[in-house]
Amino acid sequence: MIEPESIGFLIAETARLQRSEFEKRIAGAGFELTPGEARALLVIGNRSGCRQNEIAEKMGVEPMTMSGYIDKLESLELVARLPDPTDRRARNVVMTPKAEPMLAEIRQLAKMLLSDMVSEMAEGEREALHSALKIVKAALVSMSASRDAE
């Protein structure tokens, strides 16, 4: 049985609560986007020019779900699908200039959420948490890479 106060449980529960709060704030912000589409735009903004399947993997969603998100973002002229110069069958997803103001607002909303999340922590505690999470993430990435190499 997983203990509710274990590190793994606390990380998973914190991530779930953060995502839920982000979705509520996106829904309340009046964007023409669902929370999933807003998250997709954030990922595309950070990784503009990568393939749809890479974006889906980064977000942890199915490729068909991502396809729907990108269809909507494309219909709003926030992203475009362009031919991949290295693979004529593939398409890369890029942001359009029209997306920049909305992306800036979404980033600000996410930044405010993070600020609210850690408002009760001292600066040293925030830095220690950040450092510890980076170490845990690196260990998980290493485990995954080792498993994939087998």
Image: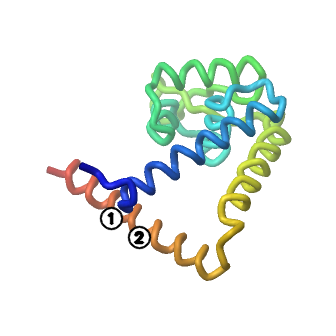
Name the residue furthest left: 150
Residue 79: image quadrant is: top right
Q: Please provide percent x and percent y for residue 7.
A: 38, 62
Residue 69 or residue 97, whichever sits in front: 69
Q: Which residue is located at x 54 percent, y 70 percent?
A: 130
Which label belongs to residue 18? none
Give the CA distance from mark 2 to mark 1.
Answer: 6 Å
The picture places residue 53, in percent across and down from the top left corner, at 46, 31
Q: Are marks 2 and 1 in contact (CB under 8 Å)?
A: yes
Judge left or right: residue 146 versus residue 99: left
Residue 73: x and y in percent read: 70, 24
Q: What residue is at 44 percent from the left and 56 percent from the top?
A: 10
Nearer-the-camera pick, 31 or 77? 31
Q: Residues within 10 Å of mark 2 (few under 14, many from 20)?
A: few
**Which residue is disc 2 drawn over?**
135
* Vertical side of 47 occupied by 83: above or below: above
Q: What type is the residue that disc 2 sits on?
A: Ile
Count of labels shown?
2
In the depicted structure, whether residue 101 falls above or below residue 111: above
Residue indicated by mark 1: 139
Task: Tell me which residue sits at (60%, 42%) in the image.
Answer: 43
Classify residue 24 as left or right of residue 86. Answer: right
Q: Secondary structure at mark 2?
A: helix
